[in-house]
């Protein structure tokens, strides 16, 4: 296996640092001809070692992070040009563990890292089936020497064990824990310097992916780790009591049947759960589990943006605007012609690339 001098020196440094900490590393590398935008790239992740973020212990979120246990390499369904590895997350108050996969692509000398969370329950890659706009964004970010990490939850981050009324706020421990782990074990190892609002360490997510990012910022205290966050088509988990049709002051916030089923899955209900049946008895719980279920946190150190589609017919833009008002003084950009998935709009994806590149 050939590795150029720059990557070789970086790998030697990483091995020395991590071996000193008592971890065992494995290098996983895709062939060079499958790695657009880089002639040589290497992904090194700790394996078989439970890990939490040492830097997040004192971040002060109102909800606790969990524990991430890295697994081995994962070649099935790995996006072209990325190296994939599996992991498991366990969270306080959530029975069992949740499986996930990371798809990592690092340039030889990255100046920053962008983590991408996909929509819905997160069971697809951010780039899955989205064609040229997503590919062009990845190429642009590679030219800017930014590494990429896509996070995928095969069984969904927003699904609770059957019959367990966990709720989305507690389940958001999963993506928040992953984001913290990526910061400490990928970003710090490959970049590891303060970029004061640029990427740096940045997060983005579309729709339910925006909620994954928003919960990490507002409920799990990750803001001190994050230089920039771009929320697209969301977060839809703002004002869940209104979304579930209990507070009817703004009909534009009410979820459709599909979105209501997703919320009910977070409370362990397969069908006909509290959101679908507009259960008034759940109003306080819905409000508590919303992204904005706490006082607005201090996010002054985070360059935070929202991108919405002018043609998005879902309730997500309304929830995003509530979030922007709750945070205060937050830029919201509406892109003509964009519907709900940002990945299908070249103009919107180009804007996203500009925002994360700083």
Image: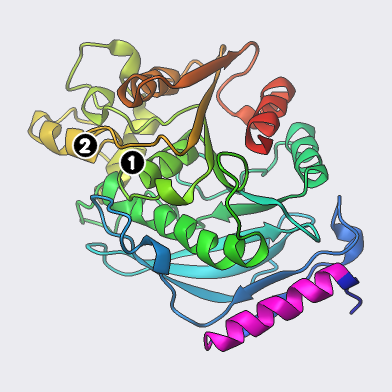
List x then y, in percent, for residue 124: 58, 48
Name the quadrant containing residue 47. bottom right
User: Is 260 left or right of 176, judged from the image as shown?
Assistant: left
Please name the residue that numbered disc 1 is placed on: 218
Residue 343 image offset from top left, x and y in percent: 66, 32
The reply to whether discs 1 and 2 touch (Cβ–Cβ < 8 Å) is yes
**Residue 78 appears at what percent x and percent y?**
70, 60
Q: Is 57 above or below relative to 228? A: below
Left or right of residue 218: residue 184: right
Q: Is residue 196 above or below residue 52?
A: above
Mark 1 Cα-neighbour bin, 10 Å: few <14, some 14–19, many ≥20? many
Q: Is residue 198 above or below residue 280?
A: below
Residue 313 on the magenta segment: no
On the rendered image, what quadrant is the C terminus found in? top right
One can see residue 12 in this view: yes
Residue at x 86%, y 59% (from the top left corner): 34
Q: Main secondary structure of the magenta part?
A: helix
Q: Which mark is residue 129?
A: none
Vertical order, 108 against 311 (above or below): below
Residue under label 2, please give it: 294
| Residue 15 colored in magenta in the image | yes
Q: Secondary structure at mark 1?
A: helix
Using the rendered image of the protein, determine whether residue 53 is visible from the camera's viewpoint: no
Q: Residue at x 66, y 23 (%)?
A: 348
**Is the residue marked by circle 2 packed among few (<14), some (14-19), or many (20+) residues within 10 Å?**
few
The residue under the point 73% across, 37% down is 134
Magenta segment: 6-22
């Amino acid at each position: 296996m050939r590795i150029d001098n720059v990557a070789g020196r970086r790998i030697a440094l990483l091995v020395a640092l991590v071996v000193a900490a008592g971890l065992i590393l494995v290098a996983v590398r895709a062939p060079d001809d499958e790695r657009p935008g880089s002639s040589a790239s290497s992904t090194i992740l700790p394996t078989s070692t439970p890990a939490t973020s040492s830097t997040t212990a004192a971040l002060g979120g109102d909800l606790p992070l969990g524990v991430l246990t890295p697994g081995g390499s994962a070649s099935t369904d790995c996006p072209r040009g990325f190296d994939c590895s599996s992991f498991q997350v366990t969270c306080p108050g959530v029975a069992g563990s949740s499986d996930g996969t990371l798809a990592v692509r690092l340039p030889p000398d990255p100046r920053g890292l962008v983590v991408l969370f996909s929509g819905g329950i997160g069971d697809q890659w951010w780039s899955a089936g989205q064609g040229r706009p997503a590919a062009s964004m990845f190429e642009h970010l590679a030219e800017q020497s930014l590494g990429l990490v896509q996070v995928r939850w095969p069984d969904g981050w927003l699904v609770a064990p059957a019959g367990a009324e966990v709720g989305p706020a507690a389940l958001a421990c999963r993506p928040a824990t992953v984001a913290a782990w990526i910061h400490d074990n990928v970003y710090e190892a490959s970049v590891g310097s303060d970029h004061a609002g640029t990427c740096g360490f940045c997060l983005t997510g579309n729709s339910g992916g925006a909620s994954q990012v928003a919960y990490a910022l507002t409920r799990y205290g990750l803001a001190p780790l994050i230089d920039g966050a771009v929320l697209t088509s969301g977060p839809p988990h703002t004002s869940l009591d209104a979304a579930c049709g209990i507070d009817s002051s703004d009909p534009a916030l009410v979820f459709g049947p599909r979105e209501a089923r997703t919320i009910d899955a977070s409370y362990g209900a397969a069908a006909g759960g509290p959101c679908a049946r507009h259960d008034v008895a759940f109003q306080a719980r819905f409000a508590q589990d919303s992204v904005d279920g706490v006082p607005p946190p201090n996010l002054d150190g985070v360059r935070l943006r929202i991108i919405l589609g002018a043609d998005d017919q879902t309730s997500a833009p309304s929830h995003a605007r509530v979030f922007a008002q709750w945070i205060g003084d937050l830029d919201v950009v509406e892109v003509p012609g964009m519907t709900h998935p940002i990945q299908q709009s070249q103009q919107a994806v180009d804007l996203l690339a500009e925002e994360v590149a700083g």
